[in-house]
Image (cartoon, grey):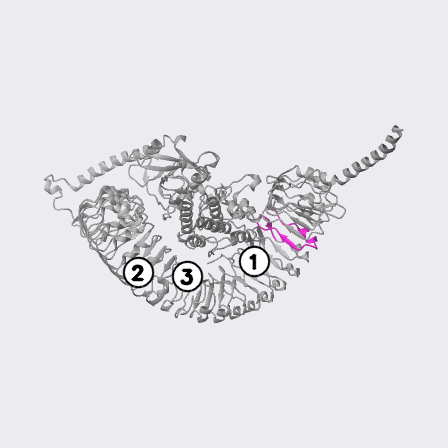
Amino acid sequence: MRSLDFNKHFFPLLILMSSIIVLVDSINEEGAVLLEFKLSLSDPNNNLHTWNQSDSFPCNWIGINCTNDHKVTSINLSNLTLSGSLSPTICKLPFLTKLNISKNFISGPIPNLSSCQSLEVVDLCTNRFHDDFPTQISTISSLKILSLCENYISGVIPEDIGNLTSLEELVVYSNNLTGIIPKSIGRLKQLKIIRAGVNSLSGPIPIEISECESLQVFGLAQNNLEGSIPRELQNLKNLTSLVLWQNRLSGEIPHEIGNFSRLELLALHANSFTGSIPKEIGKLTQLMRLYLYTNQLNGSIPEELGNCVKLVEIDLSENRLSGGIPKGLGNIKNLRLLHLFENLFVGEIPNELSHLKALKKLDLSINNLTGEIPLGFQNIFLESLQLFDNHLEGSIPPLIGANSNLTVLDISMNNLVGIIPPHLCNSQKLMFLSLGSNKLSGNIPHGLKSCKSLIQLMLGDNLLTGSLPLEFSNLYNLSAIELHQNHFTGTLPPEIGQLQNLKRLHLSDNYFFGHIPSEIGNLSQLVTFNVSSNHLFGDIPHELMNCVNLQRLDLSRNWFTGHVPFEIGNLVNLELLKLSDNKMNGPIPNSLGKLSRLTELQMGGNYFSGNVPFELGQLMALQISLNISHNSLSGTIPQNLGNLLMLESLYLNDNLLVGEIPSSIGQLVSLLVCNLSNNGLYGTVPNTPVFKKMDSSNFVGNKGLCVLGSNQCHPPSNSRSNQDSGYGVSKEKVVSIVSGVVGFFSLIFAMGVCWAIKNRKPVCVSLEEEHMKPYVLDNYYFPKVGFRYQDLVEATHNFSDDVVIGKGACGVVYKAVMGDGEVVAVKKLKSGGGGATIVDQSFLAEISTLGKIRHKNIVKLYGFCYHQESNLLLYEYMENGSLGELLHGNKNGRFLDWNDRYKIAHGAAEGLCYLHYDCRPHIIHRDIKSNNILLDKMLQPHVGDFGLAKLMDFTCSKSMSAVAGSYGYIAPEYAYTMKVTEKCDIYSFGVVLLELVTGKPPVQPVDQGGDLVTWVRRSIHGMVPISDLYDKRLDLSCKKTTNEMSLFLRIAVFCTSPSPLNRPTMREVVAMMIDARVNTPSSPSSETPLDNDSNNSCKEYVEQDEISTSPWKSG
């Protein structure tokens, strides 16, 4: 009985359990597929913790969506910091329609997804996928959205792409795609969006695209496309964005563009378009942004443009447009930015522009505009107004700045009259004011005297009067004051010494009188000090010699008396020294010989006495002029002045010099002027090509001096003639003897030359030789007498690895302790083998660049050697190495606190700003990184390593063929287009700022994005608290520090924007950095001028679209 009961209950139970098992196996099949898919992924943050194999269904797992009957239809794992690879097992999910794994760190090739025949959306953007474009994806006929942007996908867009007839969005920007755009794309009738910018696509725009009748967004910016815009594109009636900037497009902008009735964005800038702007553009009534700048457009702006009343930004700058500025632009009431600078516009600025109440930035600079500045400009809320380099007249509107947040006002280089308006700095936000080269009169208004936001004040070349305001001492942000060529009077107030950030003080050509205050010595940052052509008197204060960063010192044309302070030798950075036309006396101090960077020395027109110092012959960098004329100098001319191989002008005239002219001076092939007149010289002027080309007037007034080939041959009274000696030798015999002697020594000389060529030794030549010839085997350029190649070999222990202090792509840097104890850095560039040509180009490019640079935050080059066996550069030694070493290598145990980091960032930014704006020609560095920011013993930064620098007009440099930059620092547009702009430097500098804030190196582990920029941007996008990004080694308990770091982080995000248009200029970076420190509150609840919500602000800029445009572009 018991057995029957058991069987009665057991078999039904067994059947039930079997059914359950079968049921569970069936339900978990898609879950098992997902778990298999997960095996190929790395999940360091355990974001997929809900993916549990014990669950019955996967429908509640993170990122999974299902139908009502538990079929997986969507996988969305976006922004989960996943890495690993993408497994094709997902194609075992038959109902899967959406796959989104964007914004992760997944790498490898894109697998074959052709069996995922239900897929409608594939979004793999912002990962690290590589290899060729996945051609097999073209077989998924149901696909509507294909997003592969921001990866490393290469190859061509396949012709089979035309098979995706359901495709609505093709987003492949920021990859390594090459080749032409396939014509088959015209078969995609449903296509609404094409975004393929920031690649290397070439060829013409295919006409077939005009058949994509549903197209709304057409973006192919930053490629290598050529040809013209096909007129057939007019068929794209639904187009809202046409983005083709920075290609190689040419021809005229087609008139048919007016048929894009729905167009909101037209970005054709940075191409080579010619012809006029078509008047049909006025039909684009929905247009909001128009960018046609940096082309070759001519003709006038069509009046019809005023019909585009929805325009917010217009930039037509850097073209050849002419005619007047249309009054109809005043109808565009929403206009916020209008840039028309660097064209050929004439006529008056239309008053109708003052009706633009929303206008924030107006730049009409570098044109031929006349008339007055419209009075109505004082009633609009401008932030930046630039009208410089025109022919404007009349006065500046008196209330300008009274009702606006004016930060930049530059109306210099015009013919403006009247007074400076009193309300320019009402908002206390004015940073840059340039009113120079006008005819302004009156005093500096009180409003400027209290403008604490002011950084640069340029009022030179006007008719201004009054004294140097005492109130300037409170403007602690001032870095430049230019008041030259005015009618200022009074004394220089001692309070000027309180401007600790002052770098440039230019007060020449005024009526200042009195002494230079000793407090001037407190200006430790001063680089330029020019008070020439005033009525200053008294001694030069010894305290001035404390300004050791001075590079240009001009005290000429005053009434200074007394001796030149011996301590002037402390100003080792001086490159220009002018003390001429004063009443100074005493000897010329031999300490001038320490000024090894001096290129011009003017001391004429004084009462200096004594000998010409031998040490002047050690100033190997002298190039422009050595002028010690019109003094009372005596003795002979030092023979070693012949070492000044770069010198172009030598003035020793009107002194009491005696003796013969040193033959060495006759060998100065660069010498253009040599005035030795009105002295007591005797003998014969050396018969060399240098002196033969000189006019004889350079030698008059020397009674004993004989000038061959002229009538000015006056033998000295004590010369030994034949008659005096009593030897009665005939002229014929003299000629015969002399000819024989000359012939004999000529033979000896010729033999010596041949021997010297065969056994060539180092020869000292100048630092800034203008015409370097690469075929010369041995050229040595050193600033100090006695430096030889062998000295450097010995100082580096034959370039031993034991004294290596740095390595880079172009060579190795050694620490060299010279025989006299001086320490220098020697960079030995790579040479030989297949790379010899590249090295020579790199070497010459670096020398040509460095020889033109003069700035306290740029590394100084002492000398160089172009040699058949080695290429050497000789630099000032930096005791604290590089920023990268201190930041990431804990060099010498030294730690950089936030204040150190701020000062380093600010100084490096000033150096870069100098390269981009103040150098002539402008210079792009091309390899900005923390290891190229060198730190001296005071932790002052010096931007170095110009081996890959590009002068913007240095077209003969062939080093441009090499890749510029270092991994982790290269701007995305350069990596794919090989086009270099200043914005590449700004991107790299932004990476350095991120290093300073986060303490992390530029290259990160793959699971964190592979580079610092990606890690930061993804962290911000994922709403990671900003404080989690800070370097934990810093003292984060100080609110002022963390607030500054937050603002620096935002600046870094600006700088590293994927689009170069969205990056600021270096001038704007410097201004923002100063603003971050000056206006950073101590309490986190206070607002700052930059931002009061760092997380949201950074996120906003991180998410900027490829087709977005920049608020930063300026003239």
- The correct choice, above or below, for 570 with respect to 389 in the image is above
Label 1 amino acid?
Answer: Ala
Q: Can residue 626 be seen here?
A: no
Q: Earlier in the sequence, mark 2 or mark 3?
A: 3
The tag on residue 267 is: 1
Q: Earlier in the sequence, mark 1 or mark 3?
A: 1
Q: Can residue 612 be seen here?
A: yes
Asked whether, in this view, residue 131 is left or right of residue 907, the answer is right
Is label 1 or label 3 in front?
3
Q: Residue 423: horizontal and vertical position, in percent?
A: 40, 66
Within 10 Å of disc 3 (Cα), the crowding (few <14, some 14-19, many 20+) is: some
Label 3 amino acid?
Answer: Gln
Which secondary structure, mark 2? helix
Per the image, the residue denoted by label 3 is 428
Within 10 Å of disc 2 (Cα), the crowding (few <14, some 14-19, many 20+) is: few
Which secondary structure, mark 1? strand
- Quarter of the N terminus within the rendering: top right
Asked whether, in this view, residue 8 is left or right of residue 519, the answer is right
Which secondary structure, mark 3? loop
Mark 1 and mark 2: span between their CA atoms?
50 Å
- Label 2 close to label 3 by CB (< 8 Å): no
Residue range in magenta is: 178-204
Mark 1 and mark 3: span between their CA atoms?
35 Å
Residue 15 occupies which quadrant of the picture? top right
The tag on residue 470 is: 2
Label 2 amino acid?
Answer: Leu
Q: Earlier in the sequence, mark 1 or mark 2?
A: 1
